[in-house]
Image (cartoon, rainbow, N blue to C red):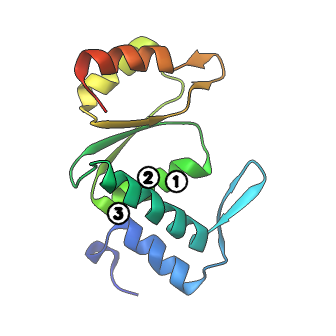
Amino acid sequence: MKPPYSRTVFDLICEQAEIDPSRIVAIDAGASLTYRQLVERSSRVAMRLRKNGVRRGDRVGLLSDNRAEWLEIFFAAAALGAIVVPFSTWSTASELEFLLNDSEVRWLFTIDRFGEQVFTDAIVSDISAHGTN
């Protein structure tokens, strides 16, 4: 195994997938996700992100509860050299507005709602005002 400082976090996941591809890396709502599946899905997401303009150094926001897609987007962005900026699903609309502006994310991936929190209204108005993708 190479020292971790010489590789990206996506490289480490790929290495684990080569060593033990069927090992479970996460369980989401009762369904399991293996290292092989995580690498395959993250690679597909990375290709779509690249096709849509995500580049090294871009800040990619992630507003979601704990789910497999969170991991897929995280590792896809990391594979491209993008900077993942996770946001809390417990943030209020005003907190999200501040965090989105302060973090300077270019891309935002989100779920519509979490519990009583509805994110789309606050995000759409902030995106319109600031031009985030």
Helix, strand or loop under label 3 = helix
Q: Quadrant of the N terminus?
A: bottom left
> Is there CB contact under 8 Å for labels 2 and 1?
yes
Residue 17 visible within the image: yes
Disc 2: which residue? 74
Residue at 56%, 17% in the rendered image: 118
User: Which amino acid lies under the numbered mark 1 shown in the image of this protein?
Assistant: Leu
Q: Disc 1 or 3, which lies upstream in sequence? A: 1
Q: Quadrant of the C terminus?
A: top left
Indicate whether 20 appears above or below 92: below
Could you say which is closer to the camera, residue 86 or residue 107? 107
Tally of numbered discs: 3
Q: Disc 3 or 2, which lies upstream in sequence? A: 2
Where residue 4 sits, quadrant-wise, is: bottom left
Residue at 40%, 18% in the rendered image: 124
Helix, strand or loop under label 1 = helix
Disc 3: which residue? 79
User: Which amino acid lies under the numbered mark 3 shown in the image of this protein?
Assistant: Ala
Residue closest to the far left: 57
Q: Residues within 10 Å of mark 2 (few under 14, many from 20)?
A: many
Which percent across, then down, holds residue 82? Answer: 28, 52
How far apart marks 3 and 2 lie (CA) works out to 9 Å
Which percent across, then down, holds residue 116? Answer: 64, 16
Residue at 60%, 52% in the rendered image: 68
Q: Is 118 situated left or right of 121 in this image?
A: right
Q: Which mark is residue 71?
A: 1
Residue closest to the far right: 30
How far apart marks 2 and 1 lie (CA) works out to 5 Å
User: Which amino acid lies under the numbered mark 2 shown in the image of this protein?
Assistant: Phe
Q: Is 25 situated left or right of 130 in this image?
A: right
Which percent across, then down, holds residue 121? Answer: 47, 14
